[in-house]
Amino acid sequence: MFIVVAFLAALCMLISSRNQVLRTINSLAVLALLGLAGDMIWRVYTQGPQSIWGGFFTWDALSALLLTVIAVIAAYVVLYSFSYMEHEVEADKVPQSRLPWYYFWIWMFIGTMLWVVSTPNLGLLWVGIEGTTLATALLVGFYREKPAVEAAWKYIVLCTVGISFALLGTMILYAASGRVNGYSLAALDWRLLVNLANQLDPALVKLGFVFAFIGYGAKVGFVPMHPWLPDAHSQAPSPVSALLSGVLLNCALYAILRWHILVRQTSLGPDFSGNLLIIFGLLSLGAMVAFILLQKDIKRLLAYSSVEHMGIIALGFGIGTPLAVWGACFHLILHALTKANLFVAVGRVVQMMGTRQIPKMRGILSLWPYTGGMLLMGLLAITGTPPFGTFRSEINIMAGLFQAGHPFLGFLTALFLSVIFAGFLYHFLGMLFGKPNERHLEERGEGSAMLWLALPLALVLILGVVVPEPLNQALNQVVELILGGGGEYGEIIKLTSVF
């Protein structure tokens, strides 16, 4: 089972610090993860929810969606880490003896995220989210420099405080459920909770959701709980930043969505939790405009972009129309692919230029055409430029705002996205087409192009042109699960199969 594979792979990393041994073990672990996760995802979407070990682990359409993102991005990041970390060793930034610990914590991180999307128990889900904090804190501070250590401590403090709120919310829900179904571990099983939703005390459920939303929202990076995120992303190794932005934030959002599904089924209805998602989604999107326009550090720029995109996704889920929820599910996938690829491209540029300062990064496209090409594609994809898939998903979410009777919010969203596009264009055009530094002209040439690194962006481009019907049907299953069923989902297929 893939969770066992991840934790077993972590232990195997400590066998040797030799590059060839680490490459072999990691490659085998990636193949096992992709094979086992792929089989489970296929079974979920073709046969329905799956469980193992007496229901201790279970997967439905929503957890299979997150499992897909985790498996794909994890494999991509681990394979990229080979060349990236070996370069860091050659540059004397990391000793060879510490490489096994890097991969150990990477696989522990992957294992805890797999746990989060595999457990049906909201209490054990909280344990998994807390586990991701412990694993990633050591990765954020991996370089052991003063800024990295400070970022790691800030990350631990803020996320631990936040996750404590989520624990309190979980305990309040346990009290509400225990009154109805008895005080046992099953009282936090969301499969049972959804069936008992109408019998739960709405006041306790409301209070519990508020605490859980604040707690998990801190991990998602919603404004104003986001300050840890730019520091952690900027100081961590670039492959870790790709995992943080592309996967971890989605796992925390997954926890909120589980609560959202439950709250929708109670007497509170869909408006309470949906409105919170809309408010914090729009706040996160709007607040990032200034940060993105004024940012000078390229990795912090991408971190603020992650806050923006999590706001867009939250907005889609909060609106609650089939089209908007479909767009949010689609955007979740596309943002993970795009941001992972951008952090990889930026990681290569930072290694070659020796700086993260945007004003000092000039002429990338002429110096390193392949890496510069990836950055150019990443710029178009992350800003939702057609024909990239992010344009389709953002249009669906904005259309959902107008469908739900929120034209002013739709106008604000379009305005924020337009200004953010202008900010990214300003930063990236200077980096790509500016006059290169003379020192960098002497170091022209990027070695092995590693064409496979651009695969995620190529996929985002293809999905902007056509959405394969199996993917469309899978997303429709997630929509139906979140919105609580109904017969309206045939229309989504017609709306999203053709742009």
Image: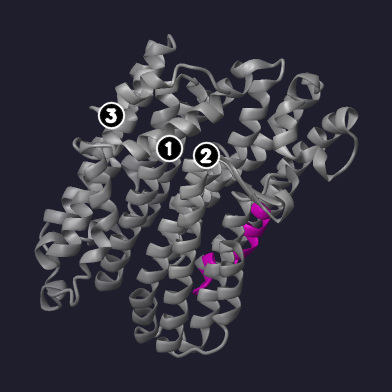
Residue designated by label 3? 497
Q: Which residue is mark 2?
A: 61
The location of residue 446, given as percent across then percent down, is: 17, 74
Check disc 1: other Cα within 10 Å, few if <14, some if 14-19, many if 20+: some
Residue drawn where x is 27% and y is 33% of the image = 391
Picture quadrant where residue 408 is located: top left
Image quarter in which the N terminus is found: bottom right
Residue at screen point 18% across, 51% down = 376
What's drawn in magenta, residue-wise?
Answer: 128-146
Q: Is residue 307 above or below residue 27?
A: above
Q: Amino acid at mark 2?
A: Ala
Q: Secondary structure at mark 2?
A: helix
- The reply to whether the C-beta atoms of the residues labelled 1 and 2 are less than 8 Å apart is yes
As helix, strand or loop, the secondary structure at mark 3 comes to: helix
Residue 474: image tag? 1
Secondary element at image label 1: helix
Q: Earlier in the sequence, mark 1 or mark 3?
A: 1
